[in-house]
Amino acid sequence: MRNLLLTLVVLFVGAVAQAQTMTPEQANTRVAELLNRADYVTLAKELPAVREMVVKPLLALADALVAHCEGRFEDSNRAIEEIGHYAEELGHGTVFGMSNYAMINHLCLENYSQGAEVIRQLLEALPATDQTEESRRGLSSLLRWMQALEGREKVEVVRPKKDVVIPVECCSIGRGEHLIVKATVNGISEDFIFDTGCSHANFISREVAQRLGVEIVADSIITHGVGGAGYVQLGVLPEMSIGDVVIKNPTFLVAEQFIPEQVDVEGMCEAALGTHIIRKLGEIRYKQKSSQMVLPATASSGAQRNLTCENGVYYLVCRQAGEQLLLHFDTGNVKSDLSSRYYARFQSYVEAEGGEVERSHSGGFGGEVWSDVRTMPRVEIQVGERGVTLQQVAVTLPASVGNDTPPTENYDGSVGVDLLTASKVVTFDLEKMFYRIDK
């Protein structure tokens, strides 16, 4: 989306400048600039004050992307339908690109029939060339996913009308920790990593799937992990329980192995609870001292949105030294880390405070990744009105420090389990899109 609007800006802003004052011109230019930068967080803050001045095609595009990033997937799809009326003004490429967002919105909403129809339209419009072959494979994979779940019931969370307490075990793993919750299926108990970085389905090994009786409904589903892409199966269960909470119709991505053989991590369990369930759990209060997650009977009011979504992946919007950071909210990550984009933004700080350059690797589904890092003894970030200190945070260095190649990441790193455990009590909600430090 970063360069879709350059021509649009010239056409519309020029017309507005001739007919009206400079204020509408500046408003349209600013909205287009933020869209080109894919800075939907800032756009969400600024759009309400200027929306009456923004031309309709540009406004529809902004509304669709802001709604998606705020987790309002139905609103996003309504705006995408409106965008279809402006193909001439926006360009067919822009309308085509927004169909990808519609597809992800449907996946997040579990509207599988509608999502499958969008994918079929995308496949029909995709040119049959070598350059589009990877896209075609990805779309075909997602179509198999959608078709396999068409006609099935959506995931449903059933819980008592009272505060629900879920015991959590904090287990040492590699250089950090995992939060483990126990799920039960037909009397069989299984450890699941509580993983806000696992999108759209739970992730388990074939061995665990067989033990729990997961029904396989589709093969050759492409998914991406730490070391790249790989193929998994798609499976379903009638229900499973986590404490007093019953989860009906959970879906699973089933891998031959949870992590590759060459990645040696002692104590790793082979199942992860994903965001398609965590989002439906609603508000979750994690109490570090008592090792509990509490689902309150009465949810908080007035919480400020500081989580954002991109393609079903959740990010925390926070600040460091007055600068905004965008960090992948990934409780499946045993330790927070910062990206080469962060390094480019705070290079002098990292070089002054960080340790010596060392070789580091991380492993998971798809393999392992090696990188050069400098470790910060501590990094202080501001989440809402409260600060939190993360200890021993690795900062990934660019592949060739000192050249003119900008970092490829569009976020500043990842916050893992240590974000939760660094505070006494935190509350978060993937539906209302907030993360709050209480104590």
Image (tube, grey):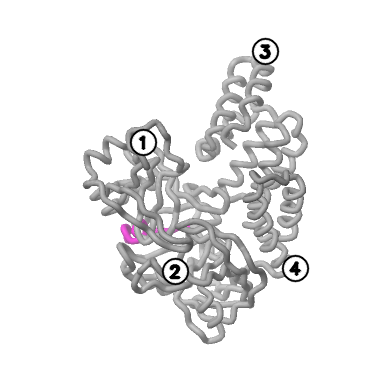
Please report contact status of discs 3 and 1: CB closer than 8 Å, yes or no: no
- Distance from disc 2 to disc 1, alpha carbons, whole Å, reads 32 Å
Q: Find disc 2 in the rendering and name its residue.
A: 193
Q: Dividing the picture into quarters, in which one does residue 172 lie? A: bottom left
- Distance from disc 3 to disc 4, alpha carbons, whole Å, reads 53 Å
- In the picture shown, does residue 69 fall above or below 165? above
Foreground pick, 35 / 116: 116
The residue lying at 66 percent from left, 58 percent from top is: 142
- The amino acid pointed to by label 1 is Arg
Q: Which mark is residue 345?
A: 1
Query: Which region shows up in magenta?
Result: 418-428
- The amino acid pointed to by label 4 is Gly
Q: Which mark is residue 18?
A: 3
Question: Does the rendering let one see residue 125?
Answer: yes
Q: Which mark is residue 151?
A: 4
- Quick one: SS at disc 3? helix
Upstream in the sequence, badge 3 or badge 2?
3
Q: Residues within 10 Å of mark 2 (few under 14, many from 20)?
A: many
Residue 128 in the figure: left or right of residue 337: right
Question: Does the rendering let one see residue 76?
Answer: no
- Quick one: SS at disc 1? helix
Please report contact status of discs 4 and 2: CB closer than 8 Å, yes or no: no
Residue 117, image x, y percentages: 76, 54
Please report contact status of discs 3 and 4: CB closer than 8 Å, yes or no: no
The residue lying at 73 percent from left, 35 percent from top is: 92
Residue 181, image x, y percentages: 44, 73
